[in-house]
Image: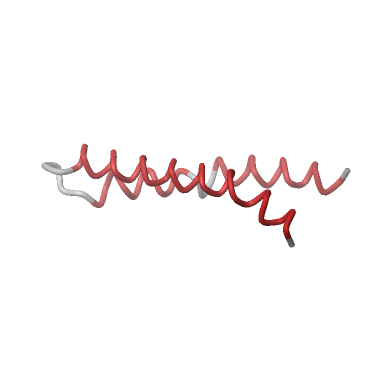
């Protein structure tokens, strides 16, 4: 039970501290001319990898 509680606490704290860093960095690293496309590609890549992790990690742990 404690592991589940600490997982929720960790996820909440991570979501408020480190998780937005990728979005802020992507918005600041591109020049103004390419910022919209760059942030769009960054966001799409982020969502694709999040989907891949959510889709493949559970079966991978099951097969171990």
User: Can you give x and y, in whole percent of width and height, for residue 22 in the image?
Assistant: 40, 49
Picture quarter with the N terminus: top right
| Residue sitting at the far right | 1
Q: Residue at x 86, y 46 (%)?
A: 2
| Residue sitting at the far front | 63
48 or 28: nearer the eye?
A: 48
22 or 61: nearer the eye?
A: 61
* In the image, residue 20 above or below residue 60: above
Number of callouts: 0
Q: Residue at x 15, y 48 (%)?
A: 31
User: Can you give x and y, in whole percent of width and height, for residue 40 in the image?
Assistant: 28, 38
Picture quarter with the C terminus: bottom right
Q: Residue at x 82, y 49 (%)?
A: 3
Q: Residue at x 53, y 46 (%)?
A: 17
User: Can you give x and y, in whole percent of width and height, for residue 6 in the image?
Assistant: 77, 46
On the rendered structure, is 19 left or right of 24? right
| Residue sitting at the far left | 33
On the rendered structure, is 57 left or right of 41? right
Colouring mode (rainbow / by chain / secondary structure / one colour): secondary structure
On the rendered structure, is 54 left or right of 50? right
């Amino acid at each position: 039970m404690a592991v589940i509680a600490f997982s929720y606490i960790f996820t909440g704290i991570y979501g408020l501290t480190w998780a937005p860093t990728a979005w802020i960095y992507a918005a600041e690293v591109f020049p103004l001319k390419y910022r919209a496309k760059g942030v769009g590609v960054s966001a799409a890549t982020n969502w694709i990898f999040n989907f891949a992790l959510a889709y493949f990690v559970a079966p991978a742990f099951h097969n171990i």
